[in-house]
Structure formats: structure tokens, C-alpha cells
Amino acid sequence: MKNKNYYAILMAGGVGSRFWPVSTAEFPKQFHDMLGTGDTLIQKTFNRLAHLIPKENIFILTNERYNDLVFEQLPEVTKRQVVLEPAMRNTAPCILYASLKIQKENPDAVMIVAPSDHWIEDEKAFSKNVQQAFDFCAKNNALMTLGITPTFPNTGYGYIEYNLEPEALEDVYIKSVNQFREKPDYETAKTFIEQGNFLWNAGIFMWSVKSVVASFKNNQPTLYALFKNGIGAYNTDFEDDFIRDNYAKAENISVDYAIMEKSKNVFVIAAEFDWNDLGTWGSLYDKLDKDSSGNAVVNSRILTEDASGNMIRTKNDKVVVVDGLQDYIIVDKDEVLLIYPKAKEQDIKKVLQKVKTTYGDHLG
């Protein structure tokens, strides 16, 4: 029997533009089967959370325009569980809004906030770490995060610096956080790894609803006041009207800046599972099985000659012939064919803007 006080907020509002042309503003990556497994990323994340959390307590936070996609891909969820943002305002406003809704329903709730588009292989280890965090958060006024042990000096992630001194905590896995660090340059990232008390920030958070609402009240009084005004309307027929009239007034701010970096009661667990944020075609390539030449293939049948290290994805069973290309992203989708060096994958966002300017917004 799952604990009725356990809740989840599944973040599914992003556009994932670095996965263009598959991920578009109309149909972003979390609703695609990026790995070729038969499940979309949001379906995989929902099922992973449901190992520990009652399905009816998993809330989906997404943009209004994705409402139909959510119900199509997660037919078991109800309208109560889908929290719609009428405007893009980063992660803090939507997390505060969902937290106040949950608090009104169950003031004893403990919850996890998790992105909908990450890859986690060892789901048992994931559940174990989340359970450790829930146990701690149920007894302590704590904001917790799951950090990932770095495997190389990555400059694409933020880092969490934890305190090395032993603390009187009941769980040896739990460390108090000293500070959050922005995405570093390569030399700084190397020093972080040499120091040994730095973790990648995966953007996965756990806390009691009491602790997170108190933190917003203390650290973001204006934002808190805006959403507190709607408490009478939450979980009633008047909620949609209140949110439509007020949501766009919220500051555009991430939960990291809004509360995590300003709070003293922040703790971290070093995750015991493999993790990948699936942020780019290159990160997807890293997680897929490769052929003997190191090509990663989704949905395609390929013939290659002198071709290695490529990420190839097309519509189902399309035959792709590649000769003389190394380390390229080759993605075919409807009106767009992308053939682009993996080394320049961070520029795909810029390319997308050029394509939209030249050929129309409908392509992005």
C-alpha cells in the first residue's frame, strides 16, 4: 500500500528546442519516444514515480497548449492532476502554485519535483534515494535535492557543493549543502571534481509541502502573496479563472534562484543511479546502443560506409545510407532534414531561429 501523503510534481512544460526538429513548440520532446523503447519520456517518468507514489497523487505541470497531449499519453490521470500554466514563467511560480494546491488538499504531504524528460536506468535505486529523502523531509524542515556524482568536468550543468564535515544526521547519505554553483568553465569544473564534494545539479527536489511553502513565504514574499490570494479558489471551479487572471503577473524565476540558493536548510543525497538529462542529441547518443562503427540509430535501417559516431533518427523503418560522415546528427522529420555536426549541437537553437525566420514559425 503506497503512502497517501506522498505526492509528485512532474514538470512537463519545456519546449526542448535543442532536440529540434523532433522536438517543436507544438510537440516537445517529453511527448516523444526519444529512446525508441515504445514509451514516451513523460510515460517513462510517470511510471517510475508510480513505483513509490500513488498514481492519483502525481500532478503534471505543463503549459496550457499541451493539455490534450497529457491526457492522450497518460489516460489514467484526471483533470485534478493536470496543473496548467497559461504563460511561461520558469519553474518557481508553477511549483509554488502546485504546492499550495497540494497543501490545501493534504497539509501532511511530502513531495518530489522531477523533470519529465530525464533518463534514469536503475529505477530501484531511484526509488530508494527518494524514499530516504521523504523519510528525512517528513521529520525535518528541509529542502532536499538529488545530486549526481560527476564522471567528467561537464560545463553544461550547475553544481552543488556540499559540506565535508561530518554532521549529526541520522543518514550517512544525506549531506548539508554549502552552496549552488553556476555552470563553470572547463578549468573550474576540473577543480570541482578534484575537490570531491561537488555534485551535478539534476533539478530533482524533495520536501514537505509545509517546508517549501514556508520557504517561498520567507524568500519570495511578493510571489507568495500573489498565489496565496488564490487559496480560496484552488481545487474548486473558480481556480481556472483566478490563474488566468493572475499567473502572468508572476516573476519569471527558477526555483533554484527563488528558494534553493537563498535557504540555509538545504540538503543533498548523492544519487545511486545512472542519470542523463537528455538535453541534447549528443546526450541521447551517449545513452543509446551503438553499432560496430559507433553509430546510434532510432527507428531507422541503415547502410553505412566509412561512417562512425553518428546519431541517426528518422520515421519508422526508413532506410538511411550514409557514406563518409563522422560524428554527425542526422534527423529526418516531416518537412525538415537536419544534418549537423555533433560538436556544434549547442548551436541548434540558433539554427532553429534562422529556419523559422526564413521558412516560417510552423517548422519550430
Image (spheres, helix red, strand yellow):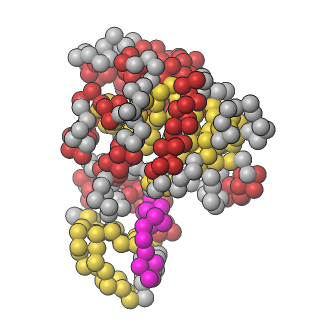
Residue at the farthest right position: 165
Residue 143 drawn at (x, y percent): 58, 30
Q: Residue at x 76, y 41 (%)?
A: 164
Quadrant placement of the C terminus: bottom left
102 with respect to 199 (left or right)? left
Above or below — where is 125 with respect to 101?
below
In this rendering, the count of numbered labels is 0
Above or below — where is 173 with respect to 280?
above
Residue at the farthest bottom position: 305
265 with respect to 21 (left or right)? right
Q: Quadrant of residue 135?
A: top right
Residue 116 visible, this angle = no
Residue 347 drawn at (x, y percent): 46, 60
Above or below — where is 186 with respect to 1?
below
Residue at the farthest front position: 1
Above or below — where is 343 with respect to 96?
below
Quadrant placement of the N terminus: top left
Q: Is residue 292 magenta?
A: yes
Residue 307 visible, this angle = yes
Q: Closer to the camera, 242 or 171?
A: 171
Q: Residue at x 57, y 50 (%)?
A: 272
Q: Closer to the camera, 249 or 35?
A: 35
Q: Residue at x 20, y 44 (%)?
A: 72
252 with respect to 167 (left or right)? left
Q: Residue at x 54, y 18 (%)?
A: 214
Residue 14 drawn at (x, y percent): 38, 44
> Which region of the structure is painted magenta?
280-294
Q: Closer to the camera, 98 or 358?
A: 98
Residue 139 drawn at (x, y percent): 58, 23
Q: Quadrant of residue 79?
A: top left
Q: Closer to the camera, 296 or 50?
A: 50
